[in-house]
Image: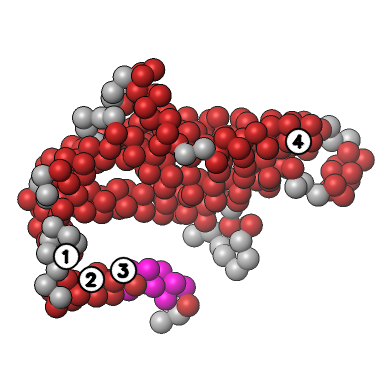
Amino acid sequence: MNTKTLEKCAPWVLLIAVIVLWQVLCTGLNVSEFIFPSPLRIAEQLNEFKGIIAGHAWRTFWVTMSGFGLAIVVGVLLGFVIGSSRLAYAAVYPLMTAFNALPKAAFVPILVVWFGIGAGPAILTAFLISFFPIMVNIATGLATLEPELEDVLRVLGAKRWDVLVKVGLPRSLPYFYGSLKVAITLAFVGTTVSEMTAANEGIGYLMISAGSSMQMGLAFAGLVVVGAMAMVMYELFSWVERHTTAWAHRGSNAQ
């Protein structure tokens, strides 16, 4: 078995080992499902309520992707503006950092007042929590363009716009894809948190409802579904990254 195959199998082997250990501990220690349900119990709940879970999961997915799509647009535009100007970088970056430090869950009640209970607060919470990594990585990719490279391009007749668009943006692609893999997981967190507070649909709402009725297996099933959706999107961006920016990764080749 070669190194590449081992790398692909390693996450699955670790996941299976964790699940087996989890099940053994729950069974051996006779842990109550109301405290910490076993993987077997979670699987039973997934199968029993698969129709209900699927409906809530679809709502969480499209809401998350709506907020995430908005985050990509705003993050790329802001990142381009900040990274292309030293003055903008010095003026905006500290303020954006301070904004990112604010707990996004605190915005949910405000968003409910503005937009009411429903998809609006969840979409905006997903956006608020996920646009910052995208913006920072695009800005960093542009702002760290080597001065020597810029000087050479200027001597060759390239204008500032040409340097940013034809060299800066392609150079920022590895940063961009790295930020997408981080931001998509944060977007699911934002949506779920908002749904737990101000929604009547979605996995977050399902988890709160299951917890209040002491169906902890169903609540954990909701967690598993959110994690699975985030993992699928993470792997999708990783696949796109490998096939579009293989040049930026040592020892890797596009398939």
Contact? badges 4 and 3 (CB < 8 Å): no
Q: Are marks 3 and 1 in contact (CB under 8 Å)?
A: no
> What colour scheme does the image use?
secondary structure
Amino acid at circle 1: Ser
Foreground mark, 3 or 1?
A: 1
Residue 226: image x %, image y %? 29, 48
The image quarter in which residue 37 lies: bottom left
Report the amino acid beneath label 2.
Trp
Query: Label 4 sits on what residue type?
Result: Ala
Q: Which residue type does callout 3 highlight?
A: Leu
Provide the residue designation for mark 2.
22
Q: Give the vertical position of 43 relative to 175 (above or below).
A: below
Which residue is under mark 3?
15
**Residues at circles 4 and 1 in contact by the CB criterion of under 8 Å:** no
The residue where tag 4 is placed is 90
Instruction: From the top left corner, tell me how far across and down residue 73 is, in percent.
Output: 53, 30
Cα distance, mark 4 to mark 1? Answer: 51 Å
- On the question of residue 5 being in view, the answer is no
| CA distance for labels 2 and 1 | 7 Å
Segment tinted magenta in the rendering: 4-13
In space, the residues marked 4 and 2 are separated at their CA atoms by: 49 Å
- x, y percent for residue 207: 21, 44
Which of label 4 and label 3 is nearer to you? 4
Q: Earlier in the sequence, mark 2 or mark 1?
A: 2
